[in-house]
Amino acid sequence: MHFTPPLLHVPYNSRKGSELESARKLDDDDIDRNRFERLIQEKMDMPTSDNGLYLARTVAPVLTKALAEVLLKRPANPIGFISEWLIRYNDEEANAFDV
């Protein structure tokens, strides 16, 4: 007879439950990402001033990509993540023009 200590034994049903919770979390993340992208798109469609138009053309597309990465990766320090992402983005853009 084989004895499994109670703390190490995980019932099959609870494993399925945690898999369902993980799938639900991924679905929730997708829903959050889609809501955020729609909100950003709606806001980008409504610039009314010269400043708004300038930001919508130049900064908003890049920041939208950075924010989407934050949503995907959910870093502990999102501001630091965005600053590092922007530096990498800027370096890649500069290197693209050097070639």
Image (cartoon, rainbow, N blue to C red):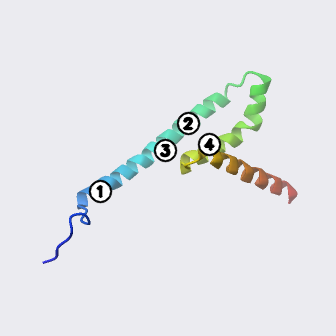
Q: Alpha-carbon neighbours of circle 1 within 10 Å: few (<14), some, or many (≥20)?
A: few
Q: Which residue is mark 4?
A: 67
Q: Earlier in the sequence, mark 4 or mark 3?
A: 3
* Residue that appears at 70% across and 43% down: 62
Per the image, label 2 sits on a secondary structure element best described as: helix
Image height of 44 relative to 26, above or below: above
**For this view, does 51 lie left or right of residue 85?**
right
**Residue type, label 1:** Lys
Q: Earlier in the sequence, mark 4 or mark 1?
A: 1
Across and down, in percent, residue 73 comes to 55, 51
Q: Earlier in the sequence, mark 1 or mark 2?
A: 1
Q: Nearer the viewer, mark 2 or mark 4?
A: 4
* Contact between labelled residues 2 and 3, with CB atoms less than 8 Å apart: no
Across and down, in percent, residue 17 comes to 29, 53
Q: Which residue is mark 1?
A: 16
Q: Which residue is mark 2?
A: 36
* Residue that appears at 38% across and 47% down: 24
**For this view, does 73 lie left or right of residue 62?**
left
Q: Examine the image and state in which quarter residue 61 appears.
A: top right
Per the image, label 1 sits on a secondary structure element best described as: helix
